[in-house]
């Protein structure tokens, strides 16, 4: 299959133990149709199983990370068709990825595109990026986590404005509000996201996996339960070779060699 036909492209970078996943429907601003979601989920799941990859970057192109769910594909749908195709249920496959995943965002991250970025773990944005939940303008509401993740990320006051007006915010506003990890020049977005991924990839894969699980628990559990969960994950890491190696390397004043065991 040529690059023109594949709606998701995957490039592994073995020397940095990272991989770059690119959404590739440029003429439709990467609108997330069934094919894109199927290929994206399959690509992330394959990389999650690949021991040569320790951190992943997902990006779009210079105009759009993704301008939302494909409106043409949804316009005539019935609720039962939506239910049976399980398009939104499929997003749980992205949530279940255990490795760190960074969204590298240029241009539009709207609707499902903004929700996709928020479902991943960190967001690196170009100065010209715009984040928004414009669904209200087409007679619906965010359906893939936007009302929940945006509110948790930036608070009710700002989330209400974005969701009720549909107006997007800039990358700088998104960073100030706590939605975005890092803002950089548009042309450096992918490079900086890959550099961040490479820094993460140097760490113990087992510790990364449990760290991601523990941080995500902050959104899903109450404090007492989440603290107990964190403590159990912390104790569990003492069963890993990477913990012995990491602490020995510190004491011997040498860099650690993490094997993911
Ligand atoms: N769906 C389908 N096609 C799209 C989408 C989209 N979301 N966004 C852009 N396109 C297409 C346009 O139709 C156009 O195609 P064509 O050239 O054939 O006419 C092409 O991409 C380029 O777009 P524009 O000409 O509109 O480009 P502009 O630079 O003038 O405008 C905008 C860019 C502002 C991004 C504009 O395209 C826009 O407003 N797009 C729609 C944004 C939107 O409303 N997104 C929310 C969609 S609903 C949603 O995401 C709900 C998620 C729920 C869960 C997900 C389930 C899978």
Image: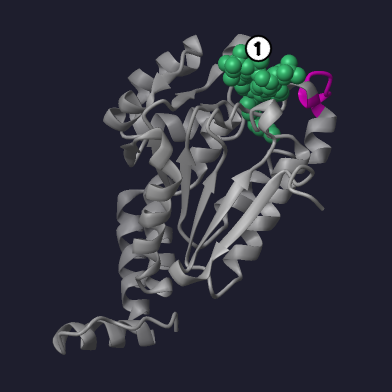
Left or right: 57, with 192 as reference point: right
Residue 175's place in the image compared with 102, above or below, is above
Q: Which residues are magenta?
A: 73-79
Q: Is residue 110 visible?
A: yes
Residue 149's place in the image compared with 221, above or below, is above
Left or right: 41, with 219 as reference point: right
- Comparing 178 with 83, the one in front is 178
Q: Residue at x 82, y 53 (%)?
A: 1
Q: Position of residue 162 (x, y in %)?
A: 44, 17
Q: Position of residue 244 (x, y in %)?
A: 29, 87
Within the image, what quadrant is residue 145 found in?
A: top right
Tell me, yes or no, whether the highlighted magenta stretch contains residue 31. Answer: no
Residue 20's place in the image compared with 136, above or below, is below
Q: Residues within 10 Å of mark 1 (few under 14, many from 20)?
A: few
Which image quarter has ligand 1?
top right
Q: Residue at x 16, y 90 (%)?
A: 252
Q: Is residue 31 visible?
A: no
> Disc 1, ligand 1: is the CB inside 8 Å?
yes
């Amino acid at each position: 299959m040529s690059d023109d036909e594949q709606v998701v492209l995957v490039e592994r970078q073995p020397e940095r133990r990272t991989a770059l996943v690119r959404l590739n429907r440029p003429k439709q601003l990467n609108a997330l149709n069934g094919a894109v979601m199927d290929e994206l989920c399959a690509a992330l799941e394959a990389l999650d199983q690949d021991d040569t990859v320790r951190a992943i970057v997902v990006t779009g192109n210079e105009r759009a990370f993704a301008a939302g769910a494909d409106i043409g594909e949804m316009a005539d749908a019935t609720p039962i068709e939506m239910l049976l195709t399980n398009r939104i249920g499929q997003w749980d496959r992205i949530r279940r990825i255990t490795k760190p995943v960074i969204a590298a965002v240029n241009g539009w991250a709207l609707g499902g595109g903004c929700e996709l970025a928020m479902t991943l773990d960190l967001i690196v944005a170009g100065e010209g990026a715009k984040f928004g939940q414009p669904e209200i303008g087409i007679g619906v509401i965010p359906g893939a986590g936007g009302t929940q993740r945006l509110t948790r990320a930036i608070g009710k006051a700002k989330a209400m404005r974005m969701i009720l007006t549909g107006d997007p915010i800039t990358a700088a506003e998104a960073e100030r509000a706590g939605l975005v990890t890092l803002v950089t020049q548009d042309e450096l977005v992918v490079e900086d996201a890959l550099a961040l991924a490479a820094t993460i990839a140097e760490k113990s894969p087992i510790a990364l996996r449990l760290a991601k699980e523990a941080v995500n628990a902050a959104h899903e559990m109450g404090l007492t339960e989440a603290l107990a969960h964190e403590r159990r994950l912390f104790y569990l890491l003492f069963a890993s070779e990477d913990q012995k190696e990491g602490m020995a390397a510190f004491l011997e004043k040498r860099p650690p060699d993490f094997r993911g065991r």
